[in-house]
Image (tube, rainbow, N blue to C red):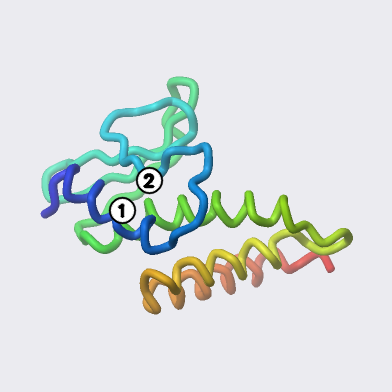
Amino acid sequence: MLTTKEIQKAVAEAVAVIGEERSSHKVFSVATTPTHTGEPHVEIVGTEYHYVFTERGEEFERHATEHDDEIIYWFVSSYVFMVAGNWELKNREPGQDSRRRIFGKEVELLKRVSDKWANRKEDEISRILEKHPYAN
């Protein structure tokens, strides 16, 4: 099991490989206590990592895993989503569902770190689009 410092190091290394402008959000800085800003933090509970989102004093999402790669992926994926969202805002195509560009950018950025992570993101996107197809 990784320590929180080792998780932070792994996330920072992945973010460096991505090489994009860092967003104003500090997802690449792995918090270990609730920020209550909607950004994630990690808790180590027994043999599990808990990836937790809190906002305004309320917990609104929690995921648990025993896998090192999984917790790192969750943090990096959140970072990549913010970078992709910022990129889409600067490169918006009028009349186009913004997710088309965001999803493509997420896969592109994750591929810089890991083909496995990029493929995983493509699978996640496919599941989203099955339930919520593009608007155009």
Pointers 1 and 2 in contact (CB under 8 A)? yes
Q: Residue furthest right?
A: 95
Mark sitting earlier along the chain (1/2): 1
Residue placed at 44% from the left, 59% from the top? 19
Disc 1 to disc 2, how far (Cα)? 6 Å
- In which quadrant is the C terminus drawn? bottom right
Residue 34 image-quadrant placement: top left
Q: Residue furthest top?
A: 57
Residue placed at 29% from the left, 51% from the top? 64
Q: Secondary structure at mark 1?
A: helix
Amino acid type at image mark 1: Val
Residue placed at 70% from the left, 67% from the top? 100
Residue placed at 43% from the left, 41% from the top? 61
Q: Which mark is residue 28?
A: 2
Judge whether 71 appears above or below 125 on screen. above
Amino acid type at image mark 2: Phe
Residue to which mark 1 is pinned:
11
Q: Position of residue 14 (x, y in %)?
A: 34, 60
Compared across the picture, whether 106 is left or right of 52 comes to right
Judge whether 52 appears above or below 85 on screen. above
Mark 2: few, some, or many residues within 10 Å (few <14, many ≥20)? many
